[in-house]
Amino acid sequence: MELTTPRLRLRPPRFADREAFALLFAEPAVRRYLAIGELDAAAAERFAEQFIGTSRYELRRHGSGALSVTLAGGGAAIGYCGIRPLPDRSDARELVYALLPDCWGSGLATEAAAACLDWCFRSLPMAHAIGFARAENVASCRVMRKLGMEHRGLSARYYDWPLAEYAAAASSWLAARVQPIEARRSGATVSLAG
């Protein structure tokens, strides 16, 4: 499976992405908003390898998971985005994303997340997508609002501290989009390969 947008390519992670993900997970500005704690370079590399393995497993087993995000022109991964299964819900999945700080503020997270939501709502038996962010992570909360996700308050259901919870219903998402969001914006398509 591969998703393309005007500026991005999202594909299943490869173990060759380990170095790029290790840089992402070792970056203090990124890590402060993720539920992974302090990681030195070696721990970030181990975590990246585990993250890639888990993501590949989820994609095979559940049909969705975190995808590597690269710029459309190619190059190393600049982060990840995807829809991951929740441990206790079959009707909902979690929207996850993280990009390197150099990519912040450019709309790339919103573009990647919109492509993932659109594909999952059209392709999987999924009634809801749920996203979580630390309340002080204003940029991440803004991404979810721009996607049309509804703020539902704070929740500590899946993580060890209260996070802002946002949700989108497949029915509302699909009703608002006669065609995929990328096609409406710029004539691009979501392509599925492999």
Image (cartoon, grey):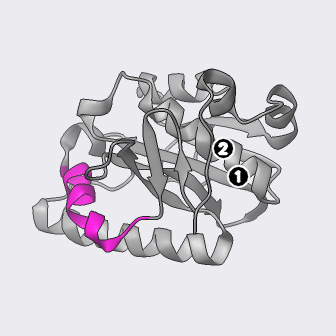
Image location (x, y in percent) of residue 64: 62, 63
Observer-nearest of 144 and 17:
17
Image location (x, y in percent) of residue 2: 54, 57
Location of residue 44 with respect to 24 vertically, above or below: below
Query: Magenta includes 36?
Result: no
Give the image quarter of residue 139. Answer: top left
Q: Please state the extent of the stretch shown in magenta in the rendering.
A: 13-26
Location of residue 154 with respect to 53 vertically, above or below: above
Q: Residues within 10 Å of mark 1 (few under 14, many from 20)?
A: many
For badge 2, the amino acid type reads Leu
Disc 2: which residue: 117
Magenta portion: prevailing SS class: helix
Helix, strand or loop status at disc 1: helix
Q: Quadrant of the C terminus?
A: bottom right
In this image, 24 relative to 41: left or right?
right
Q: Residues within 10 Å of mark 2 (few under 14, many from 20)?
A: many
Query: Magenta includes 25?
Result: yes
For badge 1, the amino acid type reads Cys
Residue 83 has which mark? none
Disc 1: which residue: 120
Observer-nearest of 68 and 154:
68
